[in-house]
Image: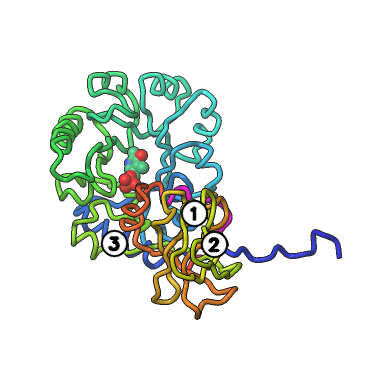
Amino acid sequence: MPKSLITSPPAALRLTIDGDALAANWRWLRERGGEAACGAAVKADGYGLGARGTVDRLAREGCRDFFVSSWAEAAVLGPMPEGAALSVLHGVREADMPAAVSGMARPVLNSAEQVARWKAAAGGVCDVMIDTGMNRLGLRPEEAGVLEGLAIETLMSHLACADEPDHPMNERQLARFRRVRASIPAKRYSLANSAGICLGDGYGFDLTRPGLALYGGVPVPDDADQRRGLQPVATIEAEVIQLRDVEPDESVGYGATWVAGLPNRVAILNVGYADGYLRGFSNVGSWRSGDAACPVIGRVSMDLVAVQVGREVREGDWLALDRDLPALARTSGLSQYELLTTLGHRYQRRWT
Ligand SMILES: *Cc1c(COP(=O)(O)O)cnc(C)c1O
């Protein structure tokens, strides 16, 4: 048989994305945003879960405003559903101009240079980012004079500390953004990301831009309301590709960092740091076989991890990773954002 006719065997690693949970999270965030319309950040390929699937699912719920970071991401994503718009957060470099003037998305202009570039090309309707204290992207409020003559759809700013509700930066940035709104004309104003939405009504303005919480992240894990309202979206499962018995005093994995006390049944799973199951889970992570916890033993390898299992587990069984992102973040020392965006490309992906 010619090689091209042999179908690729299924991966021993799968990622299931729960479209209903994604939609429920979006509706919860929309409600929390009060009067504001609710958009969706789908940069980094929808935080690792798939930008295209996310856009299509949320557009069906009524989401009309999507955000990617670059024109390369906009191009890969392809056309927006009817009535939906895409904004490119990093603005326009000279090299982006052909893509930008094609109208596939709106640039979010971040600097006087980008504004001049857009005006010189008679670029049309755009978004603008004003920096209200984060000192990342955006024009300083004092530079707003250069915006004269632009047709601004959404004027936005971004919060630096919204996941710390009591941080004084939040009110400082809110006050600055209110002054910006009073002095720079635009069709709509937008300040809040996921955590910003949870700060309360005053932060919603006309449009919110959640990312993390759509995908099952919880901005403030101690907040019972967020815990109740936001559901996990991603389920990760890995297949047992070998079982072994490890005798007392034998070690498991690179560096021999785990040594058996009693005899142990060990399952080797087809997942590793190349799949975003990073080394921070070594000796502290945990998987599930049904209801039974299967602790990670030894170091996580590139494509493999060893877990302790009971006698009922068989080669070919599938073990699942805990779906609770805040718990995974606490265990591994990674952020919830990192856990999602490092997932990698080796999963068999499925939307339900
Ligand atoms: C990434 C991003 C968001 C979404 O932030 P989350 O914390 O994931 O909700 C919103 N606005 C801007 C400008 C961003 O860069």
Q: Nearer the viewer, residue 333 or 299?
A: 299
Q: Amino acid at mark 2?
A: Arg
Magenta residues span 339-350
Residue lying at 56% horizontally and 45% vertically, measured from the top left: 76
Q: What amino acid type is highlighted by mark number 3?
A: Leu
Asked if the residues shown at circle 2 and circle 1 are in contact, with their CB atoms under 8 angstroms apart, the answer is: yes
Q: CA distance from mark 2 to mark 1?
A: 9 Å
What is the secondary structure assignment of the residue under circle 3?
loop
Give residue 230's mark. Answer: 3
Residue 345 forms part of the magenta stretch: yes
Which residue: 40% across, 75% down?
A: 292
State the image quarter where residue 7 is shown.
bottom right
Q: Quadrant of the N terminus?
A: bottom right
Q: Is residue 51 at all visible to an observer of this figure?
A: no
User: Tag 1: residue type?
Assistant: Gly
State how far apart marks 3 and 2 are (Cα): 22 Å
Residue 172: where, in percent of width, then height?
A: 14, 33
The image shows residue 260 at horizontal and vertical percentages of 47, 63
Which numbered disc, 3 or 2, marks the residue that appears first in the sequence? 3
Residue 233: x percent and y percent? 39, 62
Q: Residues within 10 Å of mark 3 (few under 14, many from 20)?
A: many
Residue 347 relative to residue 88: left or right = right
Foreground label between 2 and 1:
2
Q: Is residue 137 visible?
A: yes
Q: Position of residue 345 (x, y in %)?
A: 56, 52
Read off the residue under disc 1. 50
Question: What residue did someone put label 2 on?
Answer: 349
